[in-house]
């Protein structure tokens, strides 16, 4: 009886011990698993390069904003904060490297960028972010690297003798009724001639970055904001003669003002009008009366050769401007797209002048040979940036797509 009693007591003590220890043990196990989920390993970059867009040269990384020699560092996965010193120019691109199964996102403020896509840094200090995460587990593995781009703006301004009064903030595209104005960073005043019959035109002034604020003012228009909502465009009325417009762009304390002069009625129109008055003629110009000069007949531009006869079915170069024109069978200057001997050319829709280089035509980019003006197709390398672009069979530059396995950014540049 005593043995049975002792065994019963022993059994009860064993059960009690398990009841006391067992739940603690398994609770601890579950807690560890929960903590492991909460402390999932953060994703890291395997490499990071910041490059100057104009040359493609890699910028030195620093761990302090003073960017002294003692602050130079190489990229390390655990270090998520870097500085670079951009001594000239105002554009960079980021080249992050990740292992297979990881993703990343490059951003400046609220705007995202593709790898190797140019990023404009207008202020003296611009923070860029690269977020990396394990595919399928962004919430638990996301990690952010910051790169602060510092610019010596005073030095940049001193290097640009033609542009001392402005910051490095620019227009990306300027058009007058679909004709692109050839923009240069060191130039802020542009002149466009239109026919006297033109009573209004559409001005497009698109900035380098969507964050920039753009305003258009002029004799015939109060201050008007151009932005994404109106496609950076505005239709304006023209007075006879000179019409002057100001295009002001601002961002984060930086500012630049462009002057756009639109002459309604070109100089050739005015000279023709004076000559007509002199000869008491109406709209009928005596074409053969004036050799080696431009004439306008019934509103059409023509050029007389040394004998006073209009040039026909031939190319012609104006030695005063080095601009090419093509005159049709009736002697008038050809305008718009033109196929000659199997090659396409674009002749300005107002002046008839042959365009060259990258040209924005009817909402699309085309590359016209810098020397011959012939439209180019296929892969094209930019002499200015070193980037590769692709133009399809129609000459149109492709964007946001893949060509033969190569990815093209929103800018059209090949993402390497």
Image (cartoon, helix red, strand yellow):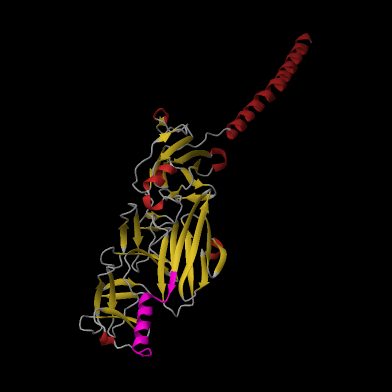
Residue 376 vertical placement versus 134 (above, below): below
Where residue 312 appears, as percent x and y from the top left, is: 25, 82
The percent position of residue 106, horizontal first and vertical second, equals: 48, 46
When asked about the image quadrant of residue 328, the answer is bottom left
Report if residue 181 is visible in the image: yes
Q: Is residue 115 above or below residue 264?
A: above
Q: Magenta span covers which residues?
A: 262-284
Total marks placed: 0
In this view, 34 is above or below 90: above
Q: Nearer the viewer, residue 64 or 197?
A: 197
Front-most of 11 and 383? 383
Residue 207 painted magenta: no
At 34% from the left and 67% from the top, the residue drawn is 395
- Residue 45 appears left or right of 327: right
Which residue is more in the foreground, 376 or 122?
122
Residue at point 75% right, 17% down? 12
Residue 173 picture location, percent across and down: 43, 61
Q: Residue 268's x, y, as percent?
A: 35, 77
């Amino acid at each position: 009886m005593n043995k049975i009693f002792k065994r019963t007591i022993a059994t009860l003590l064993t059960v009690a011990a398990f009841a006391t220890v067992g739940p603690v043990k398994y609770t601890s196990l579950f807690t560890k698993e929960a903590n492991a989920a909460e402390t999932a390993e953060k994703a890291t970059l395997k490499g990071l390069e910041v490059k100057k867009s104009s040359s493609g040269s890699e910028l030195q990384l620093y761990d302090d904003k003073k960017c002294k020699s003692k602050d130079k560092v190489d990229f390390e996965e655990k270090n998520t904060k870097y500085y670079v010193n951009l001594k000239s120019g105002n554009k960079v691109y980021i080249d992050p490297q990740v292992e297979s199964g990881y993703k990343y996102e490059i951003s400046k403020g609220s705007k995202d960028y593709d790898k190797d896509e140019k990023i404009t840094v207008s202020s003296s200090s611009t923070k860029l972010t690269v977020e990396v995460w394990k595919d399928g587990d962004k919430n638990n593995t996301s990690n952010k690297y910051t790169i602060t781009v510092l610019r010596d703006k005073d030095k940049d301004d001193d290097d640009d003798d033609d542009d001392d009064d402005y910051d490095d903030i620019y227009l990306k595209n300027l058009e007058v009724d679909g004709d692109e104005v050839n923009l240069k960073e060191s130039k802020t005043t542009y002149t466009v001639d239109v026919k006297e019959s033109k009573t209004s035109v559409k001005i497009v002034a698109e900035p380098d970055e969507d964050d920039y604020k753009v305003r258009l003012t002029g004799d015939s228009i109060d201050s008007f904001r151009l932005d994404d909502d109106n496609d950076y465009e505005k239709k304006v009325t023209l007075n006879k003669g000179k019409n002057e417009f100001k295009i002001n762009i601002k961002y984060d304390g930086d500012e630049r003002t462009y002057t756009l002069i639109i002459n309604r009625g070109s100089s050739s129109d005015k000279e023709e009008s004076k000559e007509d008055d002199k000869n008491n003629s109406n709209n009928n110009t005596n074409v053969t009366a004036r050799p080696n000069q431009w004439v306008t007949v019934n509103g059409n531009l023509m050029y007389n050769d040394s004998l006073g006869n209009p040039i026909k079915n031939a190319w012609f170069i104006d030695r005063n401007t080095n601009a090419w024109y093509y005159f049709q069978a009736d002697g008038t200057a050809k305008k718009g797209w033109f196929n000659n001997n199997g090659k396409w050319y674009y002749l300005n829709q107002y002046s008839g002048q042959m365009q060259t280089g990258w040209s924005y035509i009817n909402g699309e980019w085309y590359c016209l040979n810098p020397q011959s003006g012939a439209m180019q197709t296929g892969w094209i390398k930019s002499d200015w940036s070193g980037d590769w672009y692709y133009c399809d069979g129609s000459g149109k530059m492709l964007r946001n797509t893949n060509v033969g396995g190569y990815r093209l950014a929103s800018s059209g540049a090949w993402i390497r």
